Image: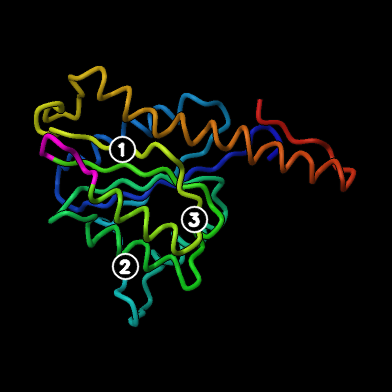
């Protein structure tokens, strides 16, 4: 991870045009982009060809996403809440990450977006269960975005400072975990091998 070689993969769980989940995720990605040397890659299922479990084809999209997640230092998953759970689009993306999943052992920050006042609590609980089952390291403090239709303008501007700070915390919490847990481990491994010590500064 020399020269702060940190790679973050973000996966969007909505395909609806101008969706609020993408608006929230964009704020988190903007926060990540403030960190020098951090590479961010977004996967949007709306422009991808993913396959249901048991089916396959010649689309390169699942392979590209699996390779990116395999190489990623951390992951952000953002989903709307539909019928008390996370979206089928997000589940499809997770299914395309292989069996066993390439998310196993990766730190994952979760974000849920809902129009109601209680936010996306149920979807985040369900998504946490799935991610934990496949071996991902689900970080504490998942971000639930409530009243999304009220806090976002049509252009994606967030008009609620507290909500925006909470959304951006998905990125900062993930970075804190990486810097405090993954970077020291990589540096120790390099030291044992007699290699040049990488830096996350």
Q: Disc 2 versus disc 3: distance between alpha carbons?
A: 21 Å
SS at circle 1:
helix
Residue that label 3 marks: 136
Residue 61 versus residue 21 in the image, above or below: below
Q: Tell me the mark number nearer the camera, choosing from 2 and 3.
A: 3
In the image, which residues are magenta? 115-121
Image quarter for residue 190? top right
Residue 151 at what x, y percent from top left?
15, 26
The quarter of the rendered structure image containing the C terminus is top right
Q: Tell me the mark number nearer the camera, choosing from 1 and 3.
A: 3
Residue 162 versus residue 135 in the image, above or below: above
Q: Residue drawn 54% across and 49% down?
A: 72
Q: Residue 50 carries which label?
A: 2
Residue 192 versus residue 34 in the image, above or below: below
Q: Residue drawn 20% across and 24% down?
A: 157
Q: Disc 1 versus disc 3: distance between alpha carbons?
A: 20 Å
Q: Which of 113 and 27 is in front in this view?
A: 113
Q: Nearer the viewer, residue 39 or 73?
A: 73
- In the image, farthest residue toward the top: 161
Q: Which mark is residue 159?
A: none
SS at circle 2:
loop
Tag 3: Cα neighbours inside 10 Å, few (<14), some, or many (≥20)? many
Tag 2: Cα neighbours inside 10 Å, few (<14), some, or many (≥20)? many
Which callout, 2 or 1, points at the residue further toward the start of the chain? Answer: 1
Residue that label 1 marks: 25
Which callout, 1 or 3, points at the residue further toward the start of the chain? Answer: 1
SS at circle 3:
loop
Image quarter for residue 4? top right
């Amino acid at each position: 991870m020399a020269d702060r070689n940190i790679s973050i993969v973000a996966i969007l769980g909505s395909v609806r045009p101008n969706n609020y989940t993408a608006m929230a995720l964009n704020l988190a990605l903007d926060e990540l982009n403030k960190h020098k040397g951090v590479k961010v890659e977004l996967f949007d299922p709306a422009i991808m060809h993913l396959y249901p479990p048991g089916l396959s084809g010649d689309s390169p999209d699942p392979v590209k996403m699996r390779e990116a997640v395999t190489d990623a230092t951390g992951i952000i998953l953002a989903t709307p809440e539909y019928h008390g759970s996370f979206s089928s689009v997000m589940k499809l993306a997770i299914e395309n990450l292989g069996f066993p999943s390439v998310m196993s052992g990766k730190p994952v920050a979760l974000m849920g977006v809902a129009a109601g006042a209680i936010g996306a609590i149920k979807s985040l609980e369900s998504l946490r269960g799935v991610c934990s089952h496949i071996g991902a390291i689900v970080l504490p403090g998942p971000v639930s975005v409530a009243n999304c239709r009220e806090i976002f303008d049509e252009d994606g501007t967030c008009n609620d400072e507290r909500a925006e700070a909470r959304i951006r915390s998905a990125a900062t919490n993930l970075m804190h975990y990486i810097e405090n847990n993954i970077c020291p481990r990589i540096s120790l491994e390099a030291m044992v091998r007699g290699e040049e010590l990488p830096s996350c500064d």
